[in-house]
Amino acid sequence: MSIFEIFDTLRKKYKCVCVRAYGGDKLEVCRIFEKMWEEYFSHRKFYAEIISGYISELLVNILRLNDDTDTGNNEMQKICEYIRRSCSKTITVSELAKMSSRSYTDFRRKFREYTGMNISEYLQTVRMEEACRELVTTDSKISCIAQNAGYNDIKYFYEVFRRFTGKTPGEFRKTAE
């Protein structure tokens, strides 16, 4: 089936075409598709050649969207930055997968490839680094530091902190002075 037959089928069935996408590069794909659609309906001189060029552009953009070497690392870098900024909040894998426009399973796999850790390990590392930084740079109470790092249960915070550093938060603070 040619692109023209596809357009004819779509036009007869739907009267118009709506393409949905999210994110900057995906919006470009929509823009190209809409230009193809407009060109097809205008039937201006050389419309077939113009559409052929748009098809090439569309395919290149689709390939770029699926190229993990370029956008994948940038995408994961943005997710990691978000985790660092939001470590005191509850963060779910589903929320992060939606942000990346990947499936839950694909997101978890890509995240592990990028960071070398699963999401829980990464989040815990970020939270512990934040707690260590605050212990060294502030005089805040340990309970406040635990909350700032995303831990509402102080006993659990102590347990995780000791596993992470080999010391209690108080010991860590004293040795850093």
Image: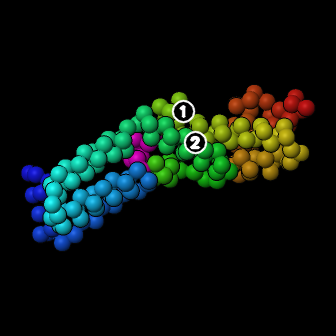
Residue drawn at the location 74% of the way across and 51% of the way down: 147
Element type where label 1 sits in the image? helix
Residue type at mark 2?
A: Cys
Q: Which residue is mark 1?
A: 115
Q: Nearer the viewer, residue 145 or 98?
A: 98
Residue drawn at the location 30% of the way across and 55% of the way down: 32
Task: Indicate left or right for 30 with 92 as reference.
Answer: left
Q: Which mark is residue 131?
A: none
Residue 10 in view, yes or no: no
In the image, the segment drawn in magenta is 101-109
Q: Quadrant of residue 80?
A: top right
Q: Quadrant of residue 156?
A: top right
Question: Main SS of the magenta segment?
Answer: helix
Residue drawn at the location 37% of the way across and 54% of the way down: 28
Taking the magenta stretch, the answer to whether it contains residue 17 is no
Q: Which residue is mark 2?
A: 80
Task: Indicate left or right for 173 with 99 as reference.
Answer: right
Residue drawn at the location 86% of the way across and 30% of the way down: 176
Proximity of marks 2 and 1: CB atoms separated by less than 8 Å: yes
Residue 151 vs 69, above or below: the answer is: below
Residue 26 vs 165, above or below: the answer is: below
Quote the CA–CA distance across marks 2 and 1. Answer: 9 Å
Callout 1 environment at 10 Å: few (<14), some (14 to 19), or many (20+)?
Answer: some
Query: Percent from the top left, x then y, of residue 15?
Result: 18, 72
Tell me which colouring the rendered structure shows: rainbow
Residue type at mark 1?
A: Thr
